């Protein structure tokens, strides 16, 4: 367990598994998400603004849910989310599918390179100049 400050309220709490939010903020976040999800079930295709007005949940939090891939935009083209790498319009998350695949490949190559460099053992000699 690690002591960290909650990313939402700043309160210190014991984080397990890299949690960023305290239990109180997680409960509030889950309650807000439930409102959004239920609204979207009843009103599919609603805009972020319509969802915010219909639920009382902030547009910022709704966009956060989109970036977390908890909800998705139905339209093919949107002006709300774009890939953080190539700026292409996306429906959910932070990256488009092409960039996700490229990042995954780059990370795999980096891990392979790191593994190979750890596998090659360097020999060091120390000379005592007395």
Image: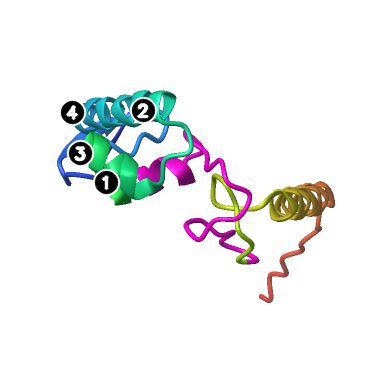
Q: Is residue 109 above or below residue 5?
A: below
Tell me which label, 1 or 3, sits earlier in the chain.
1
- Residue 5 visible in the displayed image: no
- Label for residue 41? none
Residue at which label 2 appears: 16
Estimate the x, y position of residue 122 in percent, counting from the top left.
81, 57
- Label for residue 56? 3
| Crowd tier of the residue under label 3, counting other residues whose Cα lies within 10 Å: few below 14, some 14–19, many 20 or above | few
Is residue 44 on the magenta stretch? no
Residue appearing at x 34%, y 31% in the figure: 36
Estimate the x, y position of residue 101 in percent, counting from the top left.
75, 49
Residue at which label 4 appears: 24
Q: Is residue 128 left or right of residue 9?
A: right
Estimate the x, y position of residue 115 in percent, counting from the top left.
78, 47
Q: Quadrant of residue 85?
A: bottom right
For marks 1 and 3, give the CA distance: 21 Å
For marks 2 and 1, give the CA distance: 14 Å
Q: Is residue 23 left or right of residue 118?
A: left
What span is in magenta?
61-86
Is residue 71 on the magenta stretch? yes
Estimate the x, y position of residue 90 in percent, counting from the top left.
60, 52
| Crowd tier of the residue under label 4, counting other residues whose Cα lies within 10 Å: few below 14, some 14–19, many 20 or above | few
The answer to whether marks 1 and 3 mark residues whose Cβ atoms lie closer than 8 Å is no
| Crowd tier of the residue under label 1, counting other residues whose Cα lies within 10 Å: few below 14, some 14–19, many 20 or above | few
The secondary structure making up most of the magenta span is loop
Q: Is residue 129 above or below residue 123?
A: below
Looking at the rendered image, the disc whose residue lies closer to the viewer, 2 or 1, is 1
């Amino acid at each position: 367990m690690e002591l960290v400050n909650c990313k939402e309220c700043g309160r210190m709490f014991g984080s397990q598994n890299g949690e960023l939010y305290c239990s109180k903020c997680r409960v509030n976040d889950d309650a807000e998400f439930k409102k959004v999800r239920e609204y979207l079930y009843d009103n599919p295709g609603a805009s972020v603004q319509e969802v915010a007005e219909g639920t009382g949940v902030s547009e910022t939090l709704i966009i956060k849910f989109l970036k977390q891939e908890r909800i998705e935009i139905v339209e093919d083209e949107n002006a709300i989310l774009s890939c953080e790498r190539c700026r292409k319009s996306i429906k959910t998350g932070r990256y488009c599918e092409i960039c996700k695949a490229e990042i995954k490949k780059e990370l795999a190559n980096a891990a392979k390179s790191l593994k190979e460099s750890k596998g090659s053992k360097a020999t060091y000699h120390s000379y005592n100049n007395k």
